[in-house]
Image (cartoon, rainbow, N blue to C red):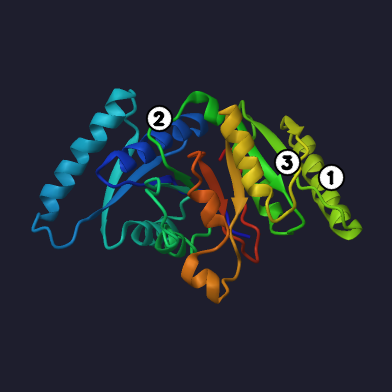
């Protein structure tokens, strides 16, 4: 078992996308009383000195944080492709989670986000993907968790439980629909497990019955969260990529780049379920 007790890491570019990631990070840091590190990379080939870039990035972040009355953070600068460099740095500092800003796709692009999702595959902590720069307080009132037949889904619950404990956050469980008896039984067992865990931790929860199968439940939950405008959606990443997924990306990519711009919290499956201590 591994405990992630490091800071909350924000991977931020110096633009509206980075601004959104920082604003979400501030909200989460305030809710969880967590140390915040804002990470960026020096752009290669633009002729700008590293010192000058660091100064400009420091000004960029201080304006955003200062406007929110938030000063408890530090800045780190790396090199390379931002998601890749942030992933490596998150592993190095044992980050408890990472926030990435992702620009909403414009037009049809079947390869959009593939490079990003591959870069985050090594993360052993959860990561949050945001597409806007206006995080309302309502987005932190609930965590929506799709419940399917996949056993990796228990990892979502472990993180969500740690995140919500002793905080005014409610978990909304959305079990998938199944007609086949075995799948139906497995989903029910996973739902029962989730309810027992949340009750033992004294975390409020609600069950919303889904109407889609395990393979489509993530998209249905995103639609529910978008309609209610009151929470993030927790999903599990694909454990192993096939040839098609290597080219076009895994199923969770569609959720991460959702058109409704619902923030997504993603957990990479791993053999040892990671543990986040109760204070998160």
Horizontally, is 3 left or right of 70 in the view? Answer: right
The reply to whether the C-beta atoms of the residues labelled 1 and 2 are less than 8 Å apart is no
Number of marks drawn:
3
Image spot of residue 29 (x, y percent)? 45, 34
- With respect to residue 41, does 55 lie above or below? above
Give the quadrant of the C terminus: top right
Instruction: Read off the residue under disc 3.
Output: 174
Of the two numbered discs 1 and 3 on the same chain, state the one appearing first in sequence: 3
In the picture as drawn, the residue positioned furthest to the right comes out as: 181
Label 1 vs label 2: CA separation? 35 Å
Residue at 8% in and 58% down? 47
Q: In the rendered view, does 252 fall on the left or right side of 117?
A: right
Q: Are marks 1 and 3 in contact (CB under 8 Å)?
A: no
Q: Is residue 162 visible?
A: no
Q: Which residue is mark 2?
A: 134
Q: In which quadrant is the N terminus drawn?
A: bottom right
The quarter of the picture where residue 271 lies is bottom right
Secondary structure category for the residue under label 2: loop
Q: Farthest residue to the bottom: give it.
A: 243
Percent across and percent down for residue 188 are: 85, 48
Mark nearer the viewer, 1 or 3: 3
Mark number for residue 115? none
> Could one spot residue 251 in this view of the protein?
yes
Residue under label 1, please give it. Answer: 192
Disc 1 secondary structure class: helix
Q: Is residue 268 above or below residue 255?
A: below
Percent across and percent down for residue 269 are: 61, 61
């Amino acid at each position: 078992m591994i405990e992630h007790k490091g800071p909350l890491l924000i991977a931020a570019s110096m633009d509206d996308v980075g601004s959104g990631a920082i604003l979400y990070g501030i909200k989460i840091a305030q809710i969880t009383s967590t140390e915040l590190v804002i990470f960026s990379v020096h752009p290669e080939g633009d002729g700008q000195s590293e010192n000058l870039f660091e100064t400009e990035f420091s000004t960029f972040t201080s304006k955003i944080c200062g406007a929110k009355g938030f000063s408890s953070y530090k800045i780190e600068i790396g090199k390379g492709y931002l998601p890749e460099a942030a992933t490596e740095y998150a592993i190095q500092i044992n980050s408890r989670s990472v926030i990435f800003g992702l620009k909403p796709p414009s037009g049809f692009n079947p390869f959009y986000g593939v490079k990003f999702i591959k870069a985050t595959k090594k993360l052993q902590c959860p990561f949050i993907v945001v597409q806007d720069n206006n995080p309302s307080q309502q987005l932190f009132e609930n965590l929506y968790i799709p419940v399917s037949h996949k056993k990796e889904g228990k990892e979502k619950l472990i993180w969500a439980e740690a995140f919500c404990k002793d905080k005014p956050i409610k978990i909304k469980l959305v079990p998938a629909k199944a007609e086949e008896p075995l799948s139906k039984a497995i989903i029910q067992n996973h739902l029962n497990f989730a309810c027992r865990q949340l009750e033992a931790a004294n975390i409020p929860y609600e069950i919303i019955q889904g109407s889609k199968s395990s393979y489509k439940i993530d998209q249905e939950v995103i639609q529910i969260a978008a309609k209610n405008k009151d929470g993030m959606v927790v999903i599990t990443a694909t454990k192993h990529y096939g040839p098609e997924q290597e080219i076009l990306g895994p199923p969770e990519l569609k959720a991460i780049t959702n058109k409704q711009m619902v923030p997504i919290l993603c957990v990479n499956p791993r053999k040892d379920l990671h543990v986040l201590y109760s204070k998160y």
